[in-house]
Amino acid sequence: MNLRTIYKICVLIGLLMVVTIPFLAWQVLINIQPRAEEVFRENILLQLDLDSLKQEVNALDNGINHVNQQQAAETPLYTESQIQKLREDIDVLQTAIGEKLEQIAMAKTTQVRLVRHVKIVIAAAMLLLAIGMTLTVFGVLGLHYHIKIYTDRRLQPRG
């Protein structure tokens, strides 16, 4: 095979890589986008649910503390069974908070995986672009300066 042919092939492959790799990376990122939006939306909704549960627990705690202070000073406004019911509600809310925290942890894990996948796609695209550029530059320089990769044995003196 002729050296000029090798250089032309390098230029052709390099240019094809430089042209197609960004398009392919863009397509992969477009395919990832709906899942990423879903994960981020889920994460936000879970965080809002967690905040509302915590606010409910704080409100019930404040209510129980207020009732306890009033019962010590005056006649009781609530019966012990009503106060016990409020404490049970707090326990149920604490359990729900624990479940939401687990769901948030799972959503964060999925989010980390998506970000890692995007980083891998970008790194692979950059690496392949660098290889394509190198092939193109090598081919163009080889064609222009007639760089010899190997010595031609036909040109050596006969021994």
Image (cartoon, rainbow, N blue to C red):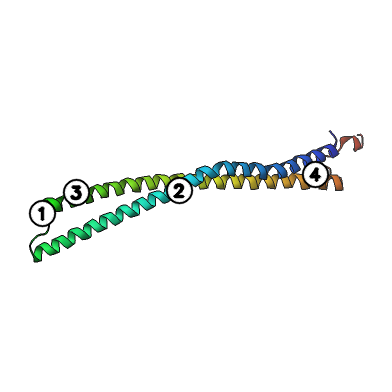
Q: Which residue is mark 4?
A: 139
Count up the numbered dots: 4
Tell me whether circle 2 and circle 4 mark residues in contact (CB < 8 Å): no
For discs 3 and 4, the disc positioned in front in the rendered view: 3
Q: Residues within 10 Å of mark 3 (few under 14, many from 20)?
A: few
Q: Earlier in the sequence, mark 2 or mark 1?
A: 2
- Position in image of residue 134 (x %, y %): 73, 47
Tell me whether circle 2 and circle 3 mark residues in contact (CB < 8 Å): no
Q: Residues within 10 Å of mark 1 (few under 14, many from 20)?
A: few
Q: Earlier in the sequence, mark 4 or mark 1?
A: 1
Q: Residue 88, labelled with which disc?
A: 3
Q: CA distance from mark 2 to mark 3?
A: 31 Å
Q: CA distance from mark 3 to mark 4?
A: 76 Å
Q: CA distance from mark 1 to mark 3?
A: 14 Å
Q: Which residue is mark 1?
A: 79
- Position in image of residue 156 (x %, y %): 90, 38
Q: Earlier in the sequence, mark 2 or mark 4?
A: 2
Tell me whether circle 4 and circle 1 mark residues in contact (CB < 8 Å): no
- Position in image of residue 23 (x %, y %): 67, 43
Of the pair 101 and 138, the residue shown nearer to us: 101
Decide: is 34 above or below 55.
Answer: above
